[in-house]
Image: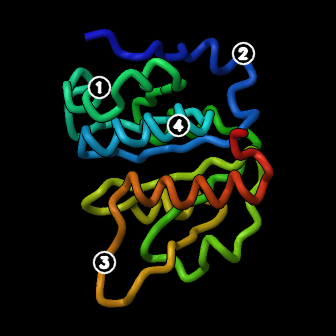
Amino acid sequence: MQMPKLRLLCDALCGDYRATMRIALFEPEIAGNVGAVLRLGACMGVAVDLIEPLGFAWEDKRVRRTAMDYIDHVEVVRHADFAAFQLLQPAARLVLLTTKADASLYDFSFQPDDILMFGKESAGVSAEVAAACDAALRIPIRPEVRSFNLATSAALALGEALRQTGDLPL
């Protein structure tokens, strides 16, 4: 199975890696969720960073099945771990979406080069990763439910961020 071309570390360091908004998935565990987020990135023109380890093999058919042919239209950058990811985000704000935050994403002012980070499905991010983020936001939901699906959260947050910055696709 052919997967999308991955940008090499040298290209990322030498090129304009962080010029636009991005989605970062921290140690995602479910291939289908990653596929759905890759499709979201393709549709909205937003690159996706995958911070390893992944909870599945990258070649897992469920990634391609969910992303379909859209996977060929999204930039995907894989990082060995969070430290490797941090090396490539010099000036961009890292905005964590988490159920543990007090601030609502609808009360936040997004910037065009923000990186929207989402934690692993079962546990979110570690305290150390959360502390490295510039902001932590939640998506308001009814109190009797726990959370949205990862891909749904990404779509809601990205849509609001792109709307605010005027970067929604035409």
Say what secondary structure mark 3 lies in.
loop
Report, in whole angstroms, how far the alpha carbon at label 1 lies from the one at label 2: 29 Å
Q: Residue at x 34, y 36 (%)?
A: 35
Say what secondary structure mark 2 lies in.
helix
Q: Earlier in the sequence, mark 2 or mark 3?
A: 2
Front position among marks 3 and 1? 1
Q: Residues within 10 Å of mark 2 (few under 14, many from 20)?
A: few
Drawn side of residue 77 relative to residue 113, left or right: left
Q: Earlier in the sequence, mark 1 or mark 2?
A: 2
- What residue is pinned by disc 4? 41
Q: Is residue 6 above or below residue 39?
A: above
Q: Earlier in the sequence, mark 4 or mark 2?
A: 2
Q: Residue at x 50, y 79 (%)?
A: 140
Q: Are marks 4 and 1 in contact (CB under 8 Å)?
A: no
Q: Earlier in the sequence, mark 3 or mark 1?
A: 1
- What residue is pinned by disc 1? 64
Say what secondary structure mark 1 lies in.
helix
Tally the marks: 4
Front position among marks 2 and 3? 3
Name the residue type under label 2: Cys
Front position among marks 4 and 3? 4
- What residue is pinned by disc 3? 146
